Amino acid sequence: MENVIAFRGVTKKYLITKGKHGLLIDTIGENLFGVFNRKKTHSGNTISALKNISFEIKKGETVGIIGRNGAGKSTILKLISKITYPNRGRVEVKGRIGAFIELGAGLHPELTGRENIYLYGAILGMKKKEIEKKFDAIVDFAEIRKFINLPIKKFSSGMYSRLGFSVCVFCDPDILLVDEVLAVGDVYFQKKCLNVMHSFAKEKTILFVSHDLAAIRKICSRVIYVERGKIIKNGNPRQVIGFYLERSKNNSSEL
Amino acid sequence: MISWFYELWEFRELLWALTLREIKVRYKQTVLGVLWAILQPVALTLIFTVVFGFFLKVDSGSVPYPIFAYSALLPWTFFTTAVSFGALSVVNNGNLVTKVYFPREILPLASVGAAFFDFLMASLVFASLLIIYHVHITLSILFIFIVVPSIFLITVGISFFLSTINVLFRDIRFVVPLVLQIWLYLTPVIYSSGQVPEKYRIFLSLNPLTPLIEGFRDITVYGKFPSSFHIILSLLISLAIFFVGFWFFKSKERIFADVM
C-alpha cells in the first residue's frame, strides 16, 4: 500500500516571547521583514513541540496517537492539515483531509442548523452540490431534523457536536483527523461515531488522537506513542498502550 | 503567484459561503437589518449637509450639496466598512485559522465582499437621489466599471495588509478607526479638491483615494469624463496596492496559526 502521510525528520518549534516588546522585536527581526536566520534564533525563546520526527502511514490504516498533554499530538495533526508548517523536515500528505480537530470551530451560533451545514461543509472543502445531495443524510445522522431551522445557539452542546461531526463524516475525506472530539456527545452518539469510523477504516485513513485508550484499542490498527516531541513507540496497539500505561505508572511514582 | 490565484479559485465556494455568513450575521437580531447599510451613508450625508452645506456653505458646484456629499460618502463608506472589518477578519476568525486549512486571504476578502453588498444596497439610494434631484447623467457613468473595481482592489489590498499586521500586533484594532477618521478629512469627500489652496493640493494627490473618490463623483453626478491619464494611473496604483498587499499577506500567512 502507498503512503498517504509521511513525516521526514520533522521539527516544529514555537516562538515564546517574553514581555510586551519581545514579540515586537522578534517578529520584526524574524517575520515581518523575513530575515529569518536560523543561527540567530535564540534557543531560549523557542520550544520544540516536535523533535526530528519521522513516521509513515499507509492508506487504509487507522492510527492512534497517544501521549500526555503537551507531548505534541495536536501539533502532528496541525502539520498534516497544513495549519502550521515545520521548521525543519518535510510533511507529505496525499488526499483530501477531513480535519475534525475541534468541535464547532466552523459553526456560527447565530446561523441556523441548515445554514451551518452549508457553511461548515464549505469550510471542509465540499462543493455546494455535494452538500445538497448529502443534506438529508447529514441531518438524520446528527438527529437534529426538528431543529434544523433554529439558530444553533439554541442547540445543546451535544447537538452542536453531532452537527459538526455529521458534516465532517459526510464530507467523505481520504484522511480523517480526529482530535478528542468524542468526549462530547452522549454514549449512544459516541458509539455511533465509532461505528462509522469502523466502517470507514477499511478504505480510509484515520488518525485518532485521544486519551480514551479503550476507544483507541478498539478501532486502531497501530498506535504511536509520543512524549516530549519524540516518538517513543510505534506499533501494535496492545503493546504500545501497555508500554504507555506502564511508563505513566512509573512516572507518577517518581513525582 | 499564479498558484495563489489558482488555489483561491479552487476555494471560491468557501469565499462565497463566508461572505454570505458575514452579511447574514451582521444583521441578525437587528431590528432594521439591511437598512443599516443604507442608513450609515444617509446619516452622514444629512450631518454633512447641515454643517458644511448649510452652515459653512461649501461650494458643491452645479449639484445640490446632499448629492455632492452622498456621491463621495457612498464609496467612502464602502472603503471604511471593508477596511474596518477586513483588518480584524483574520484575528476574529482565529478559531477557523487555528483549526482548518484554507487560503487565509478568503477572510479579508469575505469582509470586503460583505461591505460591497452594503455598497450595492446604498447605491440604490444613490440612484433614487440622482432621479429625485434630476441630475443629468451622461455616458461618463460607464466609467464606474473602471472606478469601482479600482476602489475594490485598493480596499482589498489595504485589508490584506492590515489584517496581517493585526495578527501580530492587536494595536491595529485601535489604530484603524482613528486613521480612518483622519483620512476622511484628508480626502475630498465633504469638499472638492478645487477648494484646497493650490500649494497644498500636492498632499491631496499623494492620497491614493483622492482620484478614486473624486473620479466616482465626477462620472456620476457631474457627468465629466475623466482623463485617460488619471484613470489609468489610479487603476495602476490600485493594482499595485492590491498585489503588494496580497504578496505581504501570503508571505506571512504560514505563521498565522502559530502566533494566534
Image (cartoon, coloured by chain):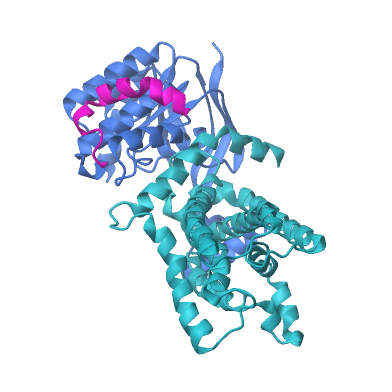
On the image, which quarter does residue B210 sit in?
Answer: bottom right
The colour one sees for chain B in the rendered image is: cyan
In the figure, is residue B227 to the left or right of A169? right
Quick check: A251 above or below B43? above
Quadrant occupied by the N terminus of chain A:
top right
Decide whether the magenta segment is chiefly helix, strand or loop. Answer: helix
**B68 lies left or right of B1:** left
Relative to A242, is B32 above or below?
Answer: below
Q: Is residue A14 visible?
A: no
* The stretch drawn in magenta includes residue A128: yes
In the figure, the blue chain has which letter? A
Q: Nearer the viewer, residue B73 or B58?
A: B58
Picture coordinates of residue B258 (x, y %)? 50, 49
In this view, A95 is above or below B81: above
Q: Residue at the front extreme?
A: B134
Q: Residue at x 30, y 57 (%)?
A: B30
Q: In the rendered structure, does residue B245 fall within the stretch colored magenta?
A: no
Residue A200, how many percent across, how many down?
37, 15
Q: Which residues are magenta?
A: A126-151
